[in-house]
Image (spheres, rainbow, N blue to C red):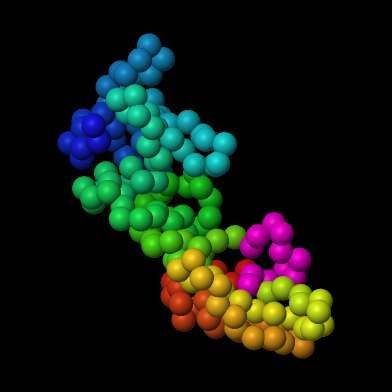
Amino acid sequence: MSLTHERLLEVLTYNKRTGLFRWKERNSNRVEVGDVAGTPHPSGYVRISIDRRFYYAHRLAVFYVTGEWPPVKVDHRDLVRNNNRWRNLRCANNSQNGGNAKLSSANTSGFKGVSWDSRRKVWRAQIRIDWQNRFLGYFSAEADAAKAYKAAAIESFGEFARAA
């Protein structure tokens, strides 16, 4: 059984300004009316159990406000996974969500989409769009490779572009 919008409105309230859900009814011996709903998941997201099924709070927020399940992803503008304020959330496809991703911890250049090509002794720029890596060029200067990535990110991801 999938959660309906009516059931969600029946059991929870959502405050767009704070991003918090609160219980409208008791659902166990530990949960009182008015308690903040949800627990942090190791991934950093907040999960809420409704009728013995877990849902991510950011997805519930979109469903609560719009009455429609998000089509693919819900992106956190500020990258803070437990910040479920309405102004911080936006629906995204996989590429847009990836465009707003943090700099990888494996990155050694300090610039998103930029890596050192040790064989050619130059900086390489590439961007990932729709699960495909797209080569942007080789550059003698790291900053030039970063500019190429940033331009491609803005063109490809628009408001979702995060170059650093």
Left or right: 156 in relation to 53: right
x then y, percent, for residue 52: 34, 24
137 or 16, nearer to the observer: 137
* Residue lying at the far front of the rendered structure: 119
Residue 164 vertical position relative to residue 143 in the rendered view, above or below = above
Q: Is residue 154 visible?
A: yes
17 or 140, nearer to the observer: 140
x then y, percent, for residue 162: 55, 69
Left or right: 43 in relation to 123: left
Q: Quadrant of residue 134?
A: bottom right
Q: Is residue 149 visible?
A: no
Left or right: 152 in relation to 118: left
Quadrant including the N terminus: top left
Q: Is residue 75 highlighted in magenta?
A: no
**Residue at left offset 38%, top offset 61%:** 92
x then y, percent, for residue 99: 51, 67
x then y, percent, for residue 164: 62, 69
**Residue at left offset 57%, top offset 36%:** 42
Which residues fall within the magenta stretch?
Answer: 103-113
Residue 13 vertical position relative to residue 120 in the rendered view, above or below = above
Q: Quadrant of residue 51?
A: top left
Q: Is residue 108 highlighted in magenta?
A: yes
Left or right: 149 in relation to 154: right
128 or 27, nearer to the observer: 128
* Residue lying at the far top of the rendered structure: 29
Give the total number of marks visible in the rendering.
Answer: 0
Magenta span main SS: loop
**Residue at left offset 49%, top offset 78%:** 154
